[in-house]
Each structure stands twice: as C-alpha cells, then as structure tokens.
Image (cartoon, rainbow, N blue to C red):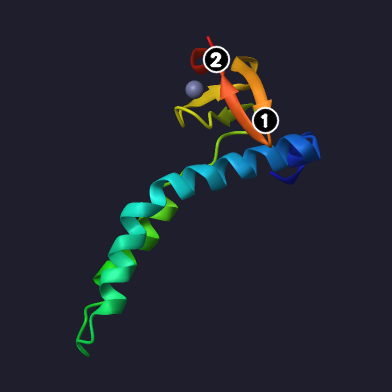
Amino acid sequence: MATDYDDLRPEVKEAQEQSLEALQTANAPTAKSAVVELEESDEPDTAPAGEIITEELIVEVVPPRQDEFTCSSCFLVHHHSQIAREHDGMLYCTECEA
Ligand SMILES: [Zn+2]
C-alpha cells in the first residue's frame, strides 16, 4: 500500500488533499447546523445521535484514488487526464472548463 503513495508526486497528493478539504467544506453546512442546534440546546439528556451522524457524513467522503481528482467546481471525481485547470491547489475538470 505504501509503495502506491511513493509513486505519487508530493504536489499531486497535496492537491488531492486540498480537493478533499474543499469537498468536506462544501458538505459542511448541513452537518455544521446540526452541531450548532445541539450546542444551543441546554437539555442535559441530549442524545449523541446527531454527533454520530455528523461523523458518518465525513467518513462517507471517499478520497479519490491516486490517478483521480475531485473537481472543485462540480465535485465529481475524474481521471487525472480530465484536469483542465489548476488554480490555488483547486482542480477543475474539462467539463467545467469547456
Ligand atoms: Zn467539474
């Protein structure tokens, strides 16, 4: 497994992580508002179910494989050959840049 990442150039790996971050940020509003509602509640018996759901939402974000990237515009995973533009570590696919 480790050898797979050795083949990956550091800057490419970093770009993928940044794309993943952007994806998580895009998904954040729903999870974040749920957490805020829990925090605003002073009920001592607040069920931790909301927190568990929030964690599951984050886990569901599957990192792209090393030969793929997540478009920062449409958030779809494309093959690296589909990269049309890179800006501030954000990758954009040929469909969005067409
Ligand atoms: Zn796109």
Mark 2, residue position? 97
Q: Secondary structure at mark 2?
A: helix
* Residue 76 position within the rendered picture, expressed as x and y whole percent measured from the top left: 46, 28
Extreme top residue here? Answer: 98
Amino acid on which the number 2 mark rests in the picture: Glu
Task: State the CA–CA distance, disc 1 to disc 2.
Answer: 12 Å
Residue depicted at x 22% and y 90%? 44
Q: Quadrant of residue 92?
A: top right
Q: Is mark 2 within 8 Å of ligand 1?
A: yes
**Left-right relation of 34 to 58:** left
The vertical placement of 2 against 98, above or below, is below
Q: Quadrant of the N terminus?
A: top right
The vertical placement of 46 against 68, above or below, is below
Amino acid on which the number 1 mark rests in the picture: His
Q: Are marks 1 and 2 in contact (CB under 8 Å)?
A: no
Residue depicted at x 49% and y 13%? 95
* Residue 70 position within the rendered picture, expressed as x and y whole percent measured from the top left: 54, 32
Report the disc number at residue 45.
none
Q: Looking at the picture, tell me which residue is in the foreground, 29 or 24.
A: 29
Q: Looking at the picture, tell me which residue is in the foreground, 10 or 30.
A: 30
Mark 1, residue position? 87
